[in-house]
Structures are given as structure tokens and as C-alpha cells.
Image (cartoon, rainbow, N blue to C red):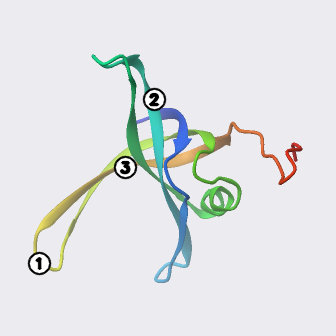
Amino acid sequence: MNKIELVGRLARDPELKLIESTGKKVCNFTLAVSRSFVNLNGEKEADFIPIVVWGKIAETVSLYVKKGGLIGVTGRLQIRSFDTKEGNRKYVTEVVGEQVIFLDTKKDDIGEIV
């Protein structure tokens, strides 16, 4: 079984791209997930986890979530590799999001919940 459930805040704004060869939309973002313990200095740490979502979910995330937004992601861990132009093999570990839940309430410019 390959299933991951995460809750965290976006470390940066999501990036929506169109894969021209397939016509599919993909959105990449990094989720900062707090650890449940503190380090030796008494500070909380976070893991920064790369997330990729496809299709309608990609469009929705790019429209409604910005840096700092709190979301939940359910998906699977994926490890893929590719060759660089220099001929080196690179490995990428990421979560492929299959479900995204928005956990923040959105406020307009005057502070009212929309």
C-alpha cells in the first residue's frame, strides 16, 4: 500500500503548467509540514515536501491556494528519475496528490469571510 496523508502550509505559491505534449495541466507546490516534537533548542521544525497534482485538482489549487494557505493532501509517494543534458541521472521524490482539502477560510480585502 502506498498512501500518504499530510496537513501543512504552502511554502510558496503553486505553479500551474500545461504539458503541451499531452494537453494535461499540472500544479507543483511545496508543503511545509510541522513535526510533532521540538529540537534541542526548543524550536519546532518542519519538513518541506514537494507535491504534484494533475488535471482539475491542479487548476483548483492554483486558483484558490496561495503561500501560507493551510491544506490537507492525500496521495502517494513517487520516486522518479531522469537524465540531465550532461548525462547524469537525477532522482526526484515527491507526493502525487489525489485529493486536496482547503482548511483555511478565505477573507476578502476588508477582512470578511467569503
Q: Would you name the residue on which mark 1 appears?
A: 86
| Image quarter of residue 47 | top left
What kind of element bears circle 2?
strand
Q: On screen, 33 above or below 12? A: above
Residue 84 image point, x, y percent: 18, 74
Which residue is disc 3 drawn over? 94
Comparing marks 3 and 2, which lies closer to the viewer?
A: 2
Q: Residue at x 31, y 19 (%)?
A: 39
Residue type at mark 3: give it. Answer: Glu
Q: Amino acid at mark 2?
A: Ser
Report the residue at 68% width, 58% height from top. 60
Image quarter (top left, top right, bottom left or bottom right) of the N terminus: top left
How many neighbours does mark 3 have within 10 angstroms: few (below 14), some (14-19), or many (20 or more)?
some
Residue 107 lies left or right of residue 35; in this view the side is right
Q: 61 and 44: which one is in front?
A: 44
- Which residue is painted at 71% across and 38% down in the image? 104
> Residue 83 at what x, y percent from top left?
18, 71
| Left or right relative to 32: residue 93 | left
Q: Which mark is residue 17?
A: none
Disc 3 from disc 2: Cα separation = 17 Å
Image position, residue 49 (x, y; %): 40, 44
| Front residue of this view, candidates 107 and 75 | 107
Disc nearer the start of the sequence (1/2): 2
Whole-angstrom CA distance, mark 1 to mark 3, is 23 Å
| Label 1 element class | loop
First in sequence, mark 3 or 2: give its number: 2
Disc 1 residue crowd, few under 14, some 14–19, many 20+, Cα 10 Å: few
Which residue does the numbered mark 2 point to in the structure image? 34
Mark 2 crowd level (few <14, some 14–19, many ≥20, 10 Å Cα)? some
Q: Secondary structure at mark 3?
A: strand
Measured in 3D between alpha carbons, the distance from the residue under mark 1 to the one under mark 2, in whole angstroms, is: 36 Å
